[in-house]
Image: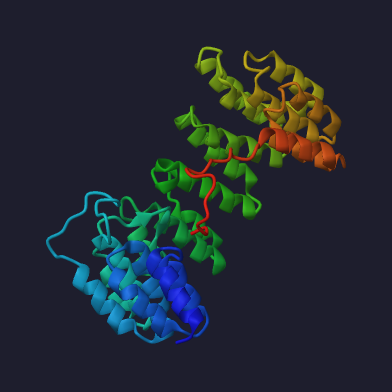
Amino acid sequence: MDATDLDFRARTRSGCIPPALASRLLARHGRAEEAFDLLVPHVDDWVLATALVDVAGVADRDEEAAALLAGLMRADHRCDGPWCCRGLDPDTALGLLATIRERQGHIDEAITLLRRRRIVSVNGRDQLADLLARHARVEELRAYAASDGHQEAVGQLAELLEKGGDVEGAIAVYGPADGPAARDPNSAYDLAQLLTRHGRGEEAIAVMRARADAHPGDDWILHALSELCLDRGRPADGLAHLDALHARRGGEDEWELYRIRLPLIAACGGIDEAVEHARAHPEGDTRYAAEDIARLLAGAGRTEEAVTVLQEHDRRNGHDLAHHLVDLGRVEEALAVLLYTSPPPPLVPATHPWSDEPAR
């Protein structure tokens, strides 16, 4: 072992190099065995356990990794949430063990493991749905998607069918009037995107309009509906829907909802009319309203005016302002704005400013 190896190991032990990063660096440079050994003592940490499973395949030590994971799973433990355990929770251990079994070609065993999880969706992904889709287990995925609480599986099944050329089947996955798209706004959005991709924009608008009616306060749904109306050349229809919601709320809209109508107004009556409406809103002179007005002007090629609007707010819109200044070729001004809005952190004086000791 040379001095470089010793220094690397010392830095890893001292925490200067996180073990997960160190293991991946070692594996990348043909030292997967060392990477695996480095991680074994830390397998009860979910981050490091994930790294261990990554390098186990390279080191040809899948069975050892599987045994370590299996040894950490207590049959009597029940998590009531994804962050129940401080270390490696049973659901994560099951998922990592399933990853190993899939890599070994034991697909049925991997599926059985994943069906034991209590929490199936993490960060918007369902590992079992992903696995079934990867191996084209269509009927199993269909049955899984039909179970309550498996919205990610619905999307995976639709994507799998669409890629296979069965567009009608993909649309049907989202169900009739009481299907997933009717119950879940995210599924409705996915269905609308699917319809749009295949030239069925009118149906997509109808899907999102129904969701907007059911959830009138969700600005992201209204954004999606408005964008569909713009794409289909029907901005007046989008405005009509927003006007109806406006009336239902007693004629008052906070800026987060009102701003959605600005591109629609611009498409119907021009940019100047949209800017006029924006400035007339009770929040029209705020910093955040200025960002939307400037974005509208810049999108119409009126970048100088966008800069003027942002400059009215004492550079509090610094990043947007700098972006538009760069577009105008005013790079020095953009740098000055960024330096003004993003000062470096203050220096922290040392406890002993003068010392003969070398820095540690």
Occupied quadrant, residue 243: top right
Coloring scheme of the render? Answer: rainbow
Q: Is residue 20 left or right of residue 73?
A: right
The front one of 179 and 97 is 97
The front one of 332 and 115 is 332
Q: Is residue 238 visible?
A: yes
Where does residue 359 sit, x and y in percent of width and height? 52, 58
The front one of 48 and 18 is 18
Where does residue 7 sit, x and y in percent of width and height? 47, 75
Q: Is residue 299 visible?
A: no
Where does residue 271 sit, x and y in percent of width and height? 80, 26
| Residue extending farthest right | 329
Q: Please determine whether, in this image, residue 20 is positioned above or below residue 6.
A: above
Q: Please determine whether, in this image, residue 267 is positioned above or below residue 188.
A: above
Question: What residue do we see at 29% from left, 69% from top?
Answer: 43
Q: Is residue 294 left or right of residue 258?
A: right
Pick the quarter of the image with the N terminus: bottom left
Q: Please determine whether, in this image, residue 108 is positioned above or below residue 13.
A: below
Question: What residue do we see at 64% from left, 45% from top?
Answer: 201
Q: How many marks?
A: 0
| Residue extending farthest left | 76
Q: Is residue 349 left or right of residue 331?
A: left
